Image (cartoon, rainbow, N blue to C red):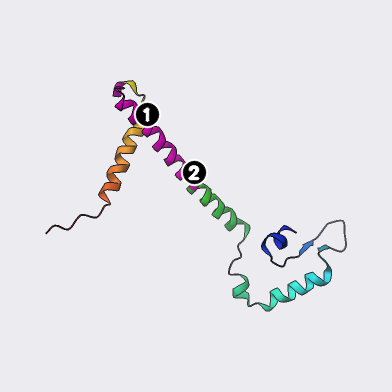
Amino acid sequence: MELTTMYGVESGLIVYCLDEQEPMVWPSHEEVQSLLKKFYKVPEMERNKKSMDLETYYKEKASKSRDQLKKQTRKTKEVKVGQFMLQISQAKMIDDFNITELDSLIWFGKTNITNIMKWPTPAIG
């Protein structure tokens, strides 16, 4: 199994089938029983420390995906704004931009003003 090979962890697998009386066990019944005994010897609090249910797993994955999407969207906007700024420096008039492009330029300005406001004020004197 990839887990044992890649990460050097002990693992086993028990698969229950509806049409079978006995479950399929990997690597063997004895090894799985030994692993289960080791697992249940660990205090319950320690066993549950890194476990999560399927709903929590999906929520965590969705949150990470949203964060990645936000970062990528921001990078894309910054690249587009950079292109607009270059066009402006090459004498393209503001009237030549469409509403979406102008909205991106406004976003860029607001974002930079917000970031500048977060800078610490220098101590005078």
Residue holding disc 2: 69
Q: Is 46 placed left or right of 69 in the picture?
A: right
Residue in the image at 37% along x and 34% along y: 82
On screen, residue 17 above or below 104: below
Residue 13 rendering spot, x and y as whole percentages = 77, 63
Name the amino acid, label 1: Glu
Residue holding disc 1: 101
Residue 33 rendering spot, x and y as whole percentages = 79, 73
Quarter of the figure with residue 31: bottom right
Going from N to C along the chain, the mark reached first, 1 or 2, is 2
Q: Nearer the viewer, residue 103 or 118?
A: 118
On screen, residue 18 above or below 84: below
The range drawn in magenta is 68-95
Separation of marks 1 and 2 at Cα, in angstroms: 20 Å
On screen, residue 47 above or below 53: below
Q: Mark 2 falls on what kind of element?
A: helix
